[in-house]
Image: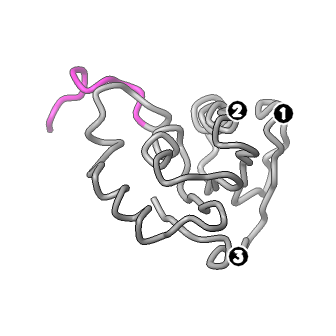
Amino acid sequence: MKILTPDEYAARGRTLQLANDVDAQAVDLGGIERIELQFPKFTDGRAYSQAYLLRRRRNFQGELVATGDVLADQLALIQRAGFDLAVLRAGQCPDLARRVWALYPGSVAGAYQGDARTESPHFARRAS
């Protein structure tokens, strides 16, 4: 997962910005390459649900971007919900966020439970 500051992030391609009260299952995804999901407060988790629905039920294969009040300690959960990119809240130190993220090596692959990208739990995954 990429971690950027607001200054480093510039939307490119066909980007759809969804407010966190929009029903992700009712949105037309035709031609959309990127969806920005908003965290208005770090305590508001509706964007996690939207990301999960977009990945699992809508099979959205484009880039999901977490924007708004995104803090370093949310990064592992943000990735498990299906996000590809996190744009940190202004004032957050990107170097600190990358160090925090490094504490969770392979957080998606190493998690015991399934997530937005890997449906089966760890015990059901077999080494090939």
Label 2: state its secondary structure: helix
Amino acid, disc 1: Asp
State which tag comes first along the sequence, 3 or 2: 3
- Tag 2 and tag 1, C-beta contact below 8 Å: yes
Q: Which residue is mark 1?
A: 21
| Disc 3 residue type (three-letter) | Ala
**To which residue does mark 3 refer?**
10
The quarter of the image holding the C terminus is top left
Q: Is residue 59 magenta?
A: no
Q: Do residues under tags 3 and 2 come within 8 Å of each other at their CB atoms? A: no
Does 125 appear in magenta?
yes
Between 41 and 108, the residue placed more toward the observer is 41
Kind of residue at disc 2: Arg
71 with respect to 40 (left or right): left
How far separated are the C-alphas under marks 3 and 2? 23 Å
Magenta span: 118-128
Q: Is 81 placed left or right of 23 in the picture? A: left
**Left of 39 or right of it: where is 91?**
left
Which residue occupies 61% across, 52% down?
70
